[in-house]
Image (cartoon, rainbow, N blue to C red):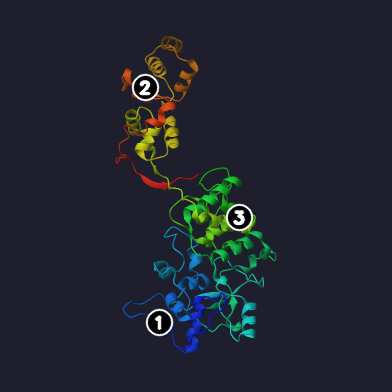
Amino acid sequence: MIIPEIMPGELALGYLYRFRDINGYKTDKNAIKALQNRFGTSGEGQLPLALLLSGALGISLQQFCRLHTLLPFARAIASYLPELSHGDTSELRPVVCHSIGLSQKNNESLKVCECCVAEDIDYWGYAYFRREHQLTGVSFCSKHFILLSESPRSVHLSIDSLRPIGSINHDMMESDDFKNAVINRYFTIVESWSMAERPIPVLNIVSVLQGRARFLGVRWSNNGNKPLLSDLALQVCPKWWLKTIFPNIDKKRPNQRLPNLDGALVQQERSFRSSAYALALSLMFDNADEALNASYECIESKSRAIKKTLKLKDGFWQGKQLTEKFIKHRGNPESIAKDLGVGARHVRNMMKKNGLPSLMGFKGSELQAFMDFQEGMSFAEVCSKNSVDSLKLEELLRSSSGKLAEALRSFNKAEINQLPTDGVVKHICAINTGSASTSLESETASYDYA
């Protein structure tokens, strides 16, 4: 068995093809079986192909994965085992899942540079597939600054096997697209990530991106007046290139979220494709080194906890369920929010919108004045009788409704006088909260948007 030397930056899949051809194996399956027989261990079953090839070359699996596979880029941003180094033999599932790109589809292609192929043949006598050319969004050679071509993946690589990349609309290209600053920052970032030792935790990189988005005035929520990151991308990047990363970008309309790009800024436990985070950094940083430093420095940061909220239908807020919660928690939005497992600010806003404003900050005398007014006394009479500030009572009247009067009637006088003010709210949030109700209408979990 001949074990050829692996070339600098050579794609593992291309190396397998060279190993196959040099040793005269008719099929990929035969080549892999030979590697298994020679470098596999009895009783271990079928080892990952990357592990077999690294054993054949006499290098560690981590070194092989970092320098010759797409695993580091595929897991550049990770939610699953983000602390695991690329190619760590203690956990082989990421290696098995991403493998080396072997496929039964013989018509699939790999990207190549025509000049690199010509130079390889002239110098080495053969050409090889480069890993950096296979990275998502890499559409031209950073050495020769020409558009990449494609070649059937399993054939002997030569100039004759090259053809234009079919997924690129060449009519949309302009001569200065290769000089686009965002594209070149993107190339620098993905190339660095493709050789990194370990992934970046998804929550950590999202914190970096959200900080930049707030600084630049970019939103990631469905609604708002600020521009979306996807709108910015279409303004500064050629569409033909964006389509190599997001093929569905043609369907995007102005001010409409592109979920697989704008969604990368949302704090959530699942990660998007690494290319989305790389493009986001390229758009929001003016310098690739600054973006890379920010991405690597955040690796050791403590991840923020995910804050999940419940989406409640209007029927909850407008019906008797809210009134029941209001009475149970004595008009305290913080306590109601804890009971429901939702954000306190949202609860406070919905209470006010539906005529049940927060009672925090109101004195018992002010609430009694409100009740007297509801019973028919004049505004001046209730202010005089209860010795309350008319402005404070007006504030309560403007945001209330018959619902509030109904709720307060269920309180006795002692309960009204014992209602807490804002100064002590933080001490009572754990009182009478119980567990979240299970009878709420159509509850669905979702992540908060900023």
- The image quadrant where one finds the N terminus is bottom left
Residue 43 point in image, percent of width and height: 31, 78
**Dot 1 and dot 3 residues touching (CB under 8 Å):** no
Q: How many marks?
A: 3
Q: Which residue is mark 1?
A: 39
**Dot 2 and dot 3 residues touching (CB under 8 Å):** no
Q: Is residue 226 left or right of residue 362?
A: right
Does any portion of residue 163 appear in the rendered image?
A: yes
Which quadrant of the view contains residue 148? bottom right
Residue 134 point in image, percent of width and height: 54, 71
Determine the CA span between mark 1 and mark 3.
Answer: 46 Å
Q: Secondary structure at mark 3?
A: helix
Residue 242 point in image, percent of width and height: 58, 61
Q: Which residue is mark 2?
A: 405
Residue type of the residue flagged with mark 2: Ala
Residue type of the residue flagged with mark 1: Phe
Sequence-wise, which precedes: disc 1 or disc 3? 1
Q: Which residue is mark 3?
A: 283
Q: Is residue 280 above or below residue 9?
A: above
Q: Secondary structure at mark 1?
A: helix
Residue type of the residue flagged with mark 3: Leu
Question: Looking at this view, is 295 or 139 the one in front?
Answer: 295
Which quadrant of the view contains residue 278? bottom right
Q: Secondary structure at mark 2?
A: helix
